[in-house]
Amino acid sequence: MQLSDVGNALTGQALSDKVKSAKDQRRAIVDGLLYENTILMISAGPGVGKSTVSAQLAIELSAGLPVFSAFVTAHPMKVLYLQTERPILEFLERAEALSRVLPINHDNLVISDCYKILNLLKEDHVHVFIDAILRDCPDADVIIVDPIYPMVSGGLSKDEPASAFCKAMSLAQKATGAAFWYNHHTVKPTHDQYGSQIEKDDPFYGSQWLKAHVTGSYLMKDIGDGAGVKLIRKKDNYNVLKKEITLEYNPESGMCTVPQDEIASHVRVLRWLQQQAMTRVTFDFRAMQEGTQLSVRALRESLRHPSVANILIVDTYIKNKKIYRVSNRGAEPPPIPTLPTQ
């Protein structure tokens, strides 16, 4: 390493410019869930559903669809999915099942199970890791690592390997500019003298270095009877993550969705507008209210949300009443992406 490898410190006008632009560097990728320049960790026990959830996330992100039918995606994203524990066939099987209800943007989705041979405790492997990402998906918006522990020989329980892993991933984020999503395991359950399981507040596996490294984390718990999972927020550096997220699982479609009554008002409006875009009909405020089952106040607030305002156009006026349509052609904002059938 040489002195030229260490970037210059910020001061003067360069510092002033960076301060002014700071707010623009953590924009939403998935509003309420995933943001630029962040690292989100999902911890759960074996078989709870980490890979099921993250595979759907990758497909919906790459297509620009609302994630879990509830969280608005800013635009179609470039997603690199690193399967590090089992063969790539596992992801492909999930993708095949989801393709029956979700459009897959194959150009925005990059999948690999080849990175599992790397050991990020070795400096030369870290360089190869970064070079491989820049080769396979040079403009990645999101990189999903499912799970993280196979890339650290000896595991993450001790401080030294955990800190080395965190340093390697920080270098990878700096080189790529991508947001990272980690799938990770929890510790094995322990029991008291009476045989009852001891509930730990945040039972992720590993050193506190790992917890300090991520900018946000959720503990994923099984709802029971195969009905779905609940994500419980355990860390949120920037106060941008939802406190809890319930995901209902549909075994027929293989999809996870947020319950209808928990979906944000503006997302319900977007879903209704998508149906109108397909029929190309015009409509008024009352029709929107009846279609979305929202209160007048909630609908008014939703119409001011950027994701709605960008695609809703006033077509004409009839006796001072606005008649709307959904923008979907020419240089106008793009149409709302097709949403999965509920």
Image: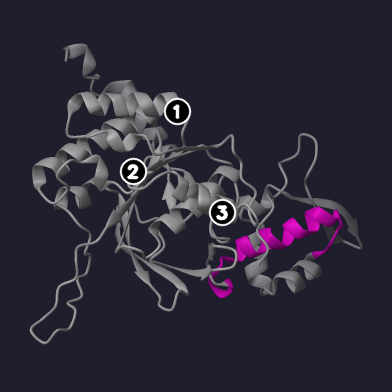
Q: Main secondary structure of the magenta part?
A: helix
The numbered mark, 2 or 3, whose residue comes first in the sequence reads: 3
Q: Is 254 rendered above or below residue 115? A: below
Magenta highlight range: 260-284
- Label 3 sits on residue: 72
Task: Tell me if I can see residue 293 in this picture.
Answer: yes
In the image, is 112 to the left or to the right of 75?
left
Instruction: Give the numbered dot on residue 182.
Output: none
Q: Amino acid type of disc 1?
A: Asp
- Label 2 sits on residue: 84
The numbered mark, 1 or 2, whose residue comes first in the sequence reads: 2
* Mark 1 surroundings: few (<14), some (14-19) or many (≥20) residues within 10 A: few
* Mark 3 surroundings: few (<14), some (14-19) or many (≥20) residues within 10 A: many
Q: Amino acid type of disc 2?
A: Thr
Alpha carbons under labels 1 and 2: distance apart: 16 Å
Element type at mark 1: helix
In the image, farthest residue toward the bottom: 194
Residue at (45% x, 74% y) in the render: 226
Q: Amino acid type of disc 3?
A: Val
Task: Tell me if I can see residue 30 in this picture.
Answer: no
Measured from the top left, where is residue 318 in percent x and y? 92, 60
Residue 276 shown in magenta: yes
- Label 1 sits on residue: 136
Callout in the foreground (2, 3): 2
Measured from the top left, where is residue 284 in percent x and y? 82, 64
Element type at mark 3: loop
Measured from the top left, where is residue 171 in percent x and y? 27, 31
Residue at (11% x, 87% y) in the render: 194
Measured from the top left, where is residue 103 in percent x and y? 65, 48
